[in-house]
Image: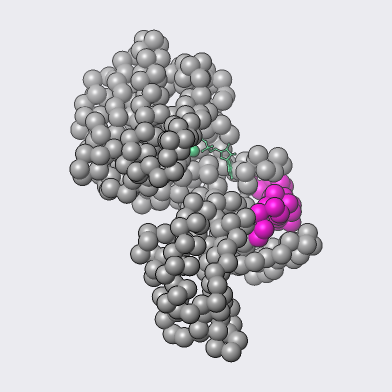
Amino acid sequence: MALIVHKYGGTSMGSTERIRNVAKRVAKWVRAGHQLVVVPSAMSGDTNRLLGLAKEISDRASPRELDMLASTGEQVSVALLCIALQAEGLEAVSYAGWQVPIKTDSSFGKARIESIDDARVRADLAAGKVVVITGFQGVDPNGHITTLGRGGSDTSAVAIAAAMKADECLIYTDVDGVYTTDPRVVPEARRLHSISFEEMLEMASLGSKVLQIRSVEFAGKYRVPLRVLSSFTPWDIDLDVEAASGTLISFEEDEKMEQAVVSGIAFNRDEAKITVVGVPDTPGIAYQILGKVAEANIDVDVIIQNVSHDGKTDFSFTVHRNDYARTMELLETVVVPTLGAQQVVGDPKICKVSIVGIGMRSHVGIASTMFRCLAEESINIQMITTSEIKTSVVIDEKYMELAVRALHKAFGLEEARDA
Ligand code: ADP
Ligand code: ASP
Ligand code: MG
């Protein structure tokens, strides 16, 4: 008997028929003798619909109320799933985050899980019940409901698996694993049988939304065995076949993986670029600009500072697109008058495209292959950033799909690598 956490995403929970299907799949695992904790997302489109309702009323809804609202989608899902499990003849009980409790900090909209008390869940499992827990939400020290950021049900599932020392956490979704890039953008993308934890961490942090970044961080920190697989296979496929399907997030330093120099391509359309033009090139300038941005709790990603001319320089960086207007306003009203910059210019229509692979550590010339490929497509690179296992470029958003397809081809990712 193993303790297994299943997570089902929005599409997997998208209709009552799909929920029945999830229940049948879970029942199969229970009947095979396993203890199951299930973490569903809201039904697909529900979270957007709820947040859209708030927006119809106000652009400045308080973060607390937005979390109160957005968290309800998952509450619908857990109840419907329990009803479906009971209809399958299983004993099942649902809990909201605060009932477990899943304790978080108070950063509404992007709360971090601080602790999970598993006593209640363990007692239910021992009594033979399937436990269904809301994804995406928790409770802060003052008893307020919080949410974990979009895509946060992945993190709920992995955190629960970590807290309970589950044997495995299975992330069921609408694709059958992690691909070399988003198969919606590149139909020739190939599923990876396994991907190293470090590569998955980079892919997720660089925009591959198949797993929320924090779920990968949790998996790494607590060594949670993690697999991404499809909920769209027939529910009654052989359990052992299902258990070995999809993509395993591997903690092994596999030699075979080292051979693939570039494992995947990630992209992110959620960023915006801001340039402070003509600031005096004096010590402390980066601190003075970015310090103000950090004080406003705005995350900065790629940063570049140009060489100076006549004692002045330009300073560019990217922020999340949701923070663009706020950052522009802050710089125009605070930083420009105090630092004597000429002006602030912004471009919200950019995107970041990244190549990722642990093989980049031991191979040279990978970045130049990337730059040549983009040059051949006449795509202008606006910013570049690198780390040991990734190279990212910021380009005009309108070339994103072209760039991803060209790079996917240039690095031979559609060819069999680990089949
Ligand atoms: P869920 O609702 O199950 O959480 P998501 O929409 O959050 O599903 O994540 C699954 C989606 O992630 C896929 O439909 C796919 O379009 C997208 N995706 C992005 N990058 C990748 C990748 N490298 N491999 C697989 N899917 C990816
Ligand atoms: N329902 C939430 C969202 O749409 C959380 C999730 O699906 O993981 O972002
Ligand atoms: Mg998701």
Q: In which quarter of the image is the N terminus?
A: top left
Return the x and y of residue 95 as percentages of the image width and height.
Answer: 29, 27
Q: Does the magenta stretch include residue 94?
A: no
Q: In this view, does 17 lie above or below 393?
A: above
Q: Which of 391 and 395 is in front in this view?
A: 395
Q: Where is residue 266 in the image (x, y as percent from the top left)?
A: 59, 52
The foreground one among 11 and 344 is: 344
Q: Residue 335 falls in which quadrant of the image?
A: bottom left
Q: Is residue 66 above or below residue 288?
A: above
Q: In this view, does 144 lie to the left or right of 388?
A: left
Could you tell me if residue 303 is visible in this image?
Answer: yes
What residue is drawn where x is 37% and y is 39%?
66
* Start-end of magenta stretch: 395-419
Image location (x, y in percent) of residue 372: 74, 66
- Identity of the residue drawn at 35% across and 44% down: 63
Q: How many labels does the image show?
A: 0
Viewer-proximal residue among 82 and 389: 82
- The residue located at (56%, 25%) in the rendering is 232
